[in-house]
Image (spheres, rainbow, N blue to C red):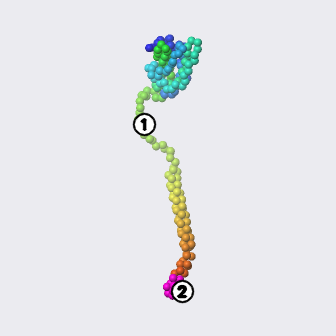
Amino acid sequence: MAVSTFASAQNTEVTLSRSYAAIGEPVGLTIVLETPDGAVVDVNPDAESWGDVRFLKLISQESIRFQEGLSHRIEMLVAPFAFGSVSFQPSVTITTDAGFTFVDLPVLTLDVPSILIPGEALALSRLQGPVPIEGAQSPLFWPAIVIGSLGALTALCLVGLISLRRWVGDRENNDALLEPLSAPVDALASAESLIEADAQGAY
């Protein structure tokens, strides 16, 4: 059941952190009001009284008890989504034991400067294609790439040549180590031929 606005909210103050903002730019909004003891105050972001301003985020909310009831303080962020002088009324819901009520608070105004040229329609337009920027590329760009490529190729050839020389050197060293083994092999072959020719004389 809805109850009287004047019976549920008194001494209302609504202030903005500043009176201007760009479109979609967050602005601080503070609400201070008094209610009977036990009342609960909530932001009503779906009310039509907000107009072209949108509730973004609740920053803080506190209630302080005093002799005649409760003092509520609500801080939030809002943002305008229209150009020009944008007027709106913040809205809250106050709930008591007797019921609830929607309360539209005093009118506020935000100045939102337009980014359009005077007389220009607010509409989406096709973006222009990419345009080459004269002088954006250094005249040394391509010569530097060629020199860098040649340098990399030269370094690769040097590495390959060094690897080949090491491989040839290692192979020659291995061949030199294997040559002394030929003498024992020849002596063994001579002994075998001598035994076959004269087995008794060999012993």
Residue 112, visible in the rendered structure? no
* Amino acid type of the residue tagged 2 in the rendering: Ala
Q: Which corner quadrant holds the C terminus?
A: bottom right
Residue 127 is labelled as 1
Q: Main secondary structure of the magenta part?
A: helix
Q: Is residue 128 visible?
A: yes
Q: Residue at x 48, y 13 (%)?
A: 98
Badge 2 marks a residue whose secondary structure is helix
Give the alpha-carbon distance from disc 1 to disc 2, as whole Å: 107 Å
Q: Which residue is mark 2?
A: 202
Looking at the picture, does residue 195 appear above or below residue 90? below
Residue 33's x, y, as percent? Answer: 54, 16
Residue at (48% x, 24% y) in the render: 55
Mark 1 or 2, nearer chain start: 1
Q: Position of residue 157 (x, y in %)?
A: 52, 61
In the image, residue 77 lies at what x, y percent? 52, 25
Q: Note whether 189 is above or below 72 in the view shown.
A: below
Residue 191 falls within the magenta-colored stretch? yes
Residue 104 appears at what percent x and percent y? 48, 17
Question: Toward the viewer: 202 or 29?
Answer: 202
Seen from the viewer's position, the closer of residues 146 and 190 is: 190
What's the residue type where badge 1 is placed? Leu
Residue located at (45% from left, 14% from top): 2
Q: Nearer the viewer, mark 1 or mark 2?
A: 2
The span picked out in magenta is 190-202
Q: Secondary structure at mark 1?
A: loop
